[in-house]
Image (tube, rainbow, N blue to C red):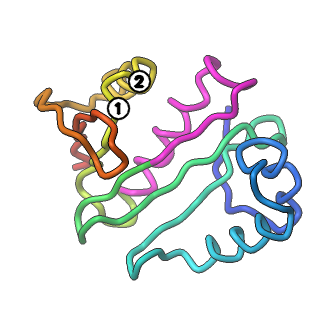
């Protein structure tokens, strides 16, 4: 069982040890302050801690693309992978997105990320299979899920 919660300043050290080792503790604290603003580039954005047994096992974000479309970005820390945390977090995040009025979740998934593709398919996401190169130079496909 997991829960999603906003990050707190005291989470900075743990985040720095895991996914943000290239940043100082102060830089991670500044990131958390930015996340508290709940927007990025003028659109809704929220970053949550994925918590299990009072330990942060990963992060998940919601980012607004339009009034009805959101993307959800899960990241489970290496030592906690393959335990179902990403799936549980995605289910919770989809419910949160629906409650916020979003109707569609749109994901760009790298074509070589078999684990993410399997996760999204298990949650009812669909794709046309069209492959393109994204802004980061990765081969990706779009996966969609209707929240209605």
| Picture disc at residue 110 | 1
Residue at left offset 33%, top offset 43%: 137
Residue at left offset 42%, top offset 73%: 44
Residue 33 lies, in percent from the top left, at: 71, 76
**Circle 1 SS class:** strand
Corner quadrant of residue 141: top left
Magenta stretch secondary structure, dominant: helix
| Other-residue count near label 1 (Cα within 10 Å), few / some / many at <14 / 14–19 / ≥20 | some
| Picture disc at residue 43 | none
Q: Is residue 37 magenta?
A: no
Corner quadrant of residue 7: bottom right
Q: Which residues are magenta?
A: 73-97
Q: Nearer the viewer, residue 120 or 88?
A: 120
**Which residue position is annotated with label 2?**
113
Corner quadrant of residue 2: top right
Q: Nearer the viewer, residue 23 or 80?
A: 23
Compared across the picture, whether 77 is left or right of 12 comes to left
Circles 1, 2 touching at the beta carbon (< 8 Å): yes
Residue 87 lies, in percent from the top left, at: 50, 29
């Amino acid at each position: 069982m997991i829960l999603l919660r906003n990050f707190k300043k005291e989470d900075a050290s743990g985040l720095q040890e895991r996914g943000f080792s290239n940043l100082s503790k102060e830089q991670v604290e500044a990131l958390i302050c930015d996340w508290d603003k709940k927007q990025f580039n003028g659109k809704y954005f929220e970053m949550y801690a994925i918590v299990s047994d009072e330990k942060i096992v990963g992060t998940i974000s919601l980012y607004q693309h339009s009034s009805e479309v959101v993307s959800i970005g899960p990241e489970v820390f290496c030592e906690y992978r393959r335990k179902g945390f990403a799936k549980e977090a995605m289910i919770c995040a989809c419910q949160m997105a629906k409650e916020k009025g979003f109707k569609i979740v749109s994901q760009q998934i790298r074509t070589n990320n078999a684990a993410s593709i399997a996760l999204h398919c298990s949650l009812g996401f669909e794709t046309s299979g069209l492959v393109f190169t994204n802004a980061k130079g990765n081969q990706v496909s779009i996966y969609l899920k209707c929240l209605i």
